[in-house]
Amino acid sequence: MTGSTTLVWFRDDLRVRDNPALTAAAKRDAPIVCLYVLDDESAGVRPLGGASRWWLHGSLEALAGELEELGLTLTLRRGPAAEVVPAVVSETSADAAFWNRRYGDAERAIDTELKSGLRADGIEVQSFQASVLVEPWTIQTGQGGWYKVFTPFYKAVLAGPPPRQPLPAPAAPDGGFHHRRLDGDDLADWALLPTRPDWAEGLRDRWRPGSAGARHRLSSFLRAGIGAYPDEHDLPAEDGTSSLSPHLRFGDVSPFEVWHATDRHRAGAPADAAGASAFLRQIVWREFAYHLLYHLPSLGTENMREEFDAFPWVKPSAPDLEAWQQGRTGIPLVDAGMRELWRTGVMHNRVRMVVASFLVKNLRVDWRVGEAWFWDTLVDADAASNALNWQWVAGSGPDAAPYFRVFNPELQAEKFDPHGEYVKRWVPEFGTADYPEPMVDLKESRRAALDAYASIR
DNA sequence: CGCTTTTTTAC
DNA sequence: TAAAAAAGC
């Protein structure tokens, strides 16, 4: 196939293993161009938050290294994807362009248009399933609709065909892949890493972005963590969760690898079977979020229960909002969570529910305000899961916790952090005169929240 | 993936 | 009299 070139456009799939687009490109006997596009400009595509940009830098660096081992080069370009991708196709005279699918509304619109435009020019375009186990249009209720409730969705996923086996990294042919080295941006020039101030120290301590870090984390979780998962995953002081969420977000590791590694472990270690099943159930929550985002593109911006459009949200004062963001509410478990988030780019899931409930119910702030803060500060910020979880806590979503379920942060601390270990770690001044008084009375604000809810139902 | 109040049951 | 269960938000 002389004269031909294949473009592989990397997006949320920053890995060489189980990357169907890359594997398909490797099967064509043609030079391969590997491209990543930083797109902060396309209408409707939400620019990545600060913590996610930090992660992206690390994942791209790792991906470039892995491609290099295969004899391939990662080219970086910046701009609207709808312009950058065709420009690279024509610059390289590529006759094929492959990518793995994404599921957000604006992203799909861009990809669909690119696909038809390139095909009209005679380019072979193929997209692949790589980031979700179950594509949102492939699973239906008995009525032929889409699922709005988790449990039936979960059962349908388990009853359906098993996820395909992950693909190995493509093997370079003798003499290595042909590849094209193009002009591109230097990763450093994208300034994804913070400077002045450098707030990323805690992130560097906590994480190793990239697929080697992901696989290391997956195997240590299966070896040492999954047996205790049912008992410990809800305890924020323990390292009881997988910590794979940011790796899954950027595709350092594929959900197919996670699924099958866990499934194999379950088969070989009966004592860990309960933990493995509970963990895979969480993986299906991620699938459910993508399912909903696809069928409800406004999941991140609109209340899914319309009655919440009339909810009397309180616009927070700047100091009140900052007290929540910076962990100075005077409620120890809330402050611990918000400080863990700021420092490490994640927050334990149990505590995410508590801080969200506090913002949305005790402070009666619109869930979108919290969603935006998480978008900026979480390394695992994901349009689907972030939106679903905020709407779940707010009570405005499909299959949501009813609004009247108000978490009491003091009781939650007694139940899930009984020795105060987590609070002590993140709020060392708790118990001293330096720690602020609660910014609201929990009992009174709960009452006010329930009254507000009564006004819309 | 709640909390609180009320009612019932078990000493 | 207190623990457990149920009900309502």
Image (cartoon, coloured by chain):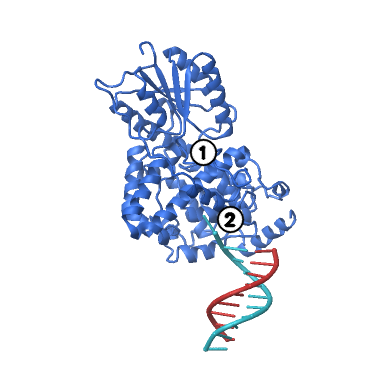
Chain colours: A blue, B cyan, C red
Q: Are marks 2 and 1 in contact (CB under 8 Å)?
A: no
Residue at (34, 23) in percent of width and height: A73
Identify residue for label 2.
A358
| Amino acid marked by disc 1 | Glu
Q: Nearer the viewer, mark 2 or mark 1?
A: 1
Quadrant in which the N terminus of chain A appears: top left
- Chain under numbered label 2: A
Whether marks 2 and 1 lie on the same chain: yes
Identify residue for label 1.
A135
Residue at (30, 26) in percent of width and height: A68
Mark toward the start of the polypeptide (2 vs 1):
1
* Vertical position of residue A155 compared to residue A130: above or below: below
SS at mark 1?
loop
Q: Is residue A402 left or right of residue A415?
A: right
Q: Is residue A300 left or right of residue A379?
A: right
Nearer the observer, A204 or A251? A251
Dot 1 alpha-carbon crowd within 10 angstroms: few under 14, some 14 to 19, many 20 or more: some
Q: Position of residue C1 (x, y in %)?
A: 57, 86
Q: Position of residue A194 (x, y in %)?
A: 43, 35
Nearer the observer, A448 or A253? A253
* Vertical position of residue A97 compared to residue A319: above or below: above
